[in-house]
Image (cartoon, helix red, strand yellow):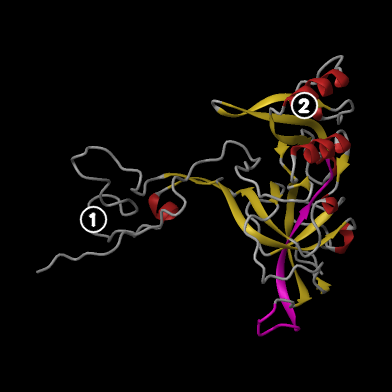
Amino acid sequence: MPEKTHPRRGSLAHAPKKQASDEKPRIRSWPEKREVGLLGFPGYKAGMTHIFMVDDHPGRRTEGQEINVPVTILEVPPIRVCGIRVYGEDYEGEKALTEVWAEDFSEDLSKTVKLPDNYDQEEAFGNAQKFMDNGKVEDVVILFNTQPRLSSIPKKKPKVMELRLGGDSIEDKWDYSKDILGEEVRFSEVFDEGNYSDIFAITKGKGFEGPVQRWGVKIQPSKVQQARRHTGVLGPWNPNSIMSSVPTSGQEGYHQRMEYNKRILKVDDDGEEVTPNGGFLRFGNIENDYVMIKGSVPGSTKRMIFMRKPMREKEELPTTPPDITYVDTSSQQGGN
């Protein structure tokens, strides 16, 4: 009788499932944009609701009709540009040559980094300009800090991140970074309604899980001598090691994930328009600028979400602001 065979069970699409080192997502690649400006912006996840909007996607059966769409609300308080970093090239690759810091800092920035005493900004600008004149500069980026005190989350300690700039030349990036050094930047200055963005976030943590929950392997029948919720064979005798492709127990959740082309439906500064009666569950009221994203977003409530300019833009997608006819603001706590 022939031996029964079947494909392996369980998906290894996101292997290895490694726990993130920080709730701040890490962005490893950036799009090439010709216009000078910031290529991303952070926010905080408030919750979800649903809206009614006129379908403006060409070619759909519901084009021109009113449809129900689930949306995610992110609170996006303004960020403050606290520094400029100049990169050069050496035998090991990209290397930071020098930095220029702002003179006025946020009051909470000292909770994250040690602020310099008696800082001479003119001398720092002079050192950076020498590298610019020598032609050793390969890229110019900015350093910004978040301002969670302005949002509804119970947090004061800001995050400091590096943010790339768009532009054709190094000189354009250098001039633009000098203009915004020490200034606040709002979300509406980076993204417009109807645009698309790539979402970076850390997913909800679920702790230590077995292979059934973690990889979807089949539960063994009840007559097996050992446990049922485990992998049948971890590997051969030779080589006597467990390969990385074998589904095993370990960390589930709290992984960094990214989604392409999430549409920005609305950007505004009046949080009452989207805040449900009684506030969002486990978040509260929107007290600052907010952005409405079509669909779901990875991560838990109050978690930091980073939006980047899209890497894989599609020409057939609509880019104009949609016509939103209704936003559901009914209570999420069981009332009206």
Work out whether residue 300 or residue 112 is closer to the camera in this orientation and state it: 112
Q: Is residue 275 visible?
A: no
Of badges 1 and 2, the one in the foreground is 2
| Circle 2 residue | 133
| Circle 1 residue | 224
Q: Position of residue 170 (x, y in %)?
A: 75, 38
Circle 1 sits in a helix, a strand or a loop, which is it? loop
- The extreme top residue here reads 118
- Seen at 29% across and 59% down, the residue is 220
Q: Earlier in the sequence, mark 1 or mark 2?
A: 2
- The extreme front residue here reads 134
Q: Position of residue 109 (x, y in %)?
A: 80, 29
Classify 10 Å Cα crowding around label 1: few (below 14), some (14-19), many (20 and above): few
Q: Position of residue 295 (x, y in %)?
A: 67, 65
Taking the magenta stretch, the answer to whether it contains residue 52 is no
Q: Is residue 306 visible?
A: yes
Work out whether residue 167 or residue 152 is closer to the camera in this orientation and state it: 167
Q: What is the CA distance from the residue labelled 1 to the residue labelled 2? A: 74 Å
**Which amino acid type is shown beneath numbered disc 2?**
Asp
Please give left or right for residue 58 compared with residue 289 in the image.
Answer: left
Circle 2 sits in a helix, a strand or a loop, which is it? helix
> Do callouts 1 and 2 mark residues in contact (Cβ within 8 Å)?
no
**Which amino acid type is shown beneath numbered disc 1?**
Val
Q: Quadrant of the C terminus?
A: bottom right
Span colored in magenta:
58-79
Q: In the figure, 63 relative to 269: above or below?
A: below
